[in-house]
Amino acid sequence: MKERYGLIVALDDWNKGKFLLDWYGVFNINWGIDNHTNIISRLRVKVGDYSYIMIDMRGNYSIILEIKGLTMKDKIIILLPVKGNSKRLKNKNLKLLNEEPLFTYACGQVWDIADKLVFDAYISSESKEVEKIWTNSGWMQIFEFLKRPKELSEDPNQIEEVCLYVLNQLKTNYDTLIMIQPSNPFVQSEDIENCYKMFTENNRSTVRSIYKTSKSFFKSFVMHGNKLTSPAFNQLKKIQTCNYPDSYLGNGSLIVIDVKKFKKEKTFLTECSIGYEMPRERSIDIDDSMDFFIAEQLMKKGE
């Protein structure tokens, strides 16, 4: 590939500073300083049809960047599906947790991973309130907002349908989808990084975040009306309880999946999936008021 160079000047107004380049790659960066203006703390640059690069901007100066392009190997999309009209806990993604809307905790962790991964990031929502928060916050520097049809936020539509809708709406042919559900405010940037690393090191097998349950599900019963039947897993009833295998649940946090495989199978439950175990105290998937209360207490405990 022929080497090509270009100059970008960082502006102090993000709305005027969205740069579209006609090449792509991993960057070697030479930078000069022009002391005359304050600038945003980070700059998002779209590189051809590939990814956004986050570059730290420290101090009160504008920076001129000289960029050398090389070929990228993986086109990554990070997607936050933010439902506005949740039913069990009304408007939970907008509900203030420690004075911040719930969905913005995931946004912060994506921001923190931006100096380690190259990606495009999108918030998908039908909610005008979510869009308003995005518009009035610093998340515009890293996330694009995609309005989705209201019917995709109604039951019984699944999260897979939302992700497929987004992928089909975008012109870029992505290789990898990292889906982060904003209902768990305890996801950390290293979780995102570790899941992606597991994905690449295991032949691009689907990675799902999980946690180990305190009691094995193999002890569970089934109810028919008001009658309690034998354990759901009859084949284990002769095995001593202490010998039951451990059981795990998805914690509603992270999924990393190959886009071609996802589009073909239209499900995150692919064969040969890999579990990324997170501690139970960081596996709070908020569905109802009790989950939210637990998250509040954990937040206070961590302060």
Image (cartoon, rainbow, N blue to C red):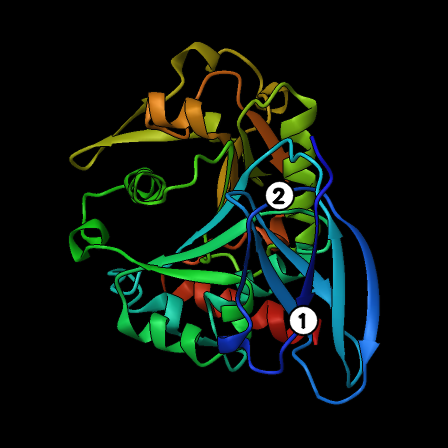
Inspect the image, locate mark 1, and give the three-letter code of the amino acid beneath it. Val
The residue indicated by pointer 1 is 9
How many labels, in total? 2
Q: Which numbered disc covers residue 87?
A: none
Q: Residue at x 62, y 62 (%)?
A: 111
Q: Answer above or below: position of 217 versus 192.
A: above
Q: Residue at x 69, y 40 (%)?
A: 194
Q: Answer above or below: position of 164 versus 263.
A: below
Q: Residues within 10 Å of mark 1 (few under 14, many from 20)?
A: some
Inspect the image, locate mark 2, and give the three-letter code of the amino acid beneath it. Tyr
Q: Residues within 10 Å of mark 2 (few under 14, many from 20)?
A: many
Q: Along the polypeptide, which appears first: circle 1 or circle 2?
A: 1
Question: On the rendered image, what quadrant is the C terminus found in?
Answer: bottom right
Q: Position of residue 21 (x, y in %)?
A: 57, 53
Q: Residue at x 65, y 35 (%)?
A: 72
Question: On the rendered image, what quadrant is the N terminus found in?
Answer: top right
Mark 2 residue element: loop
Q: Which numbered disc covers residue 24?
A: 2
- 233 horizontally vs 250: left or right: left
Mark 1 residue element: strand
* Residue 231 appears in the figure: no
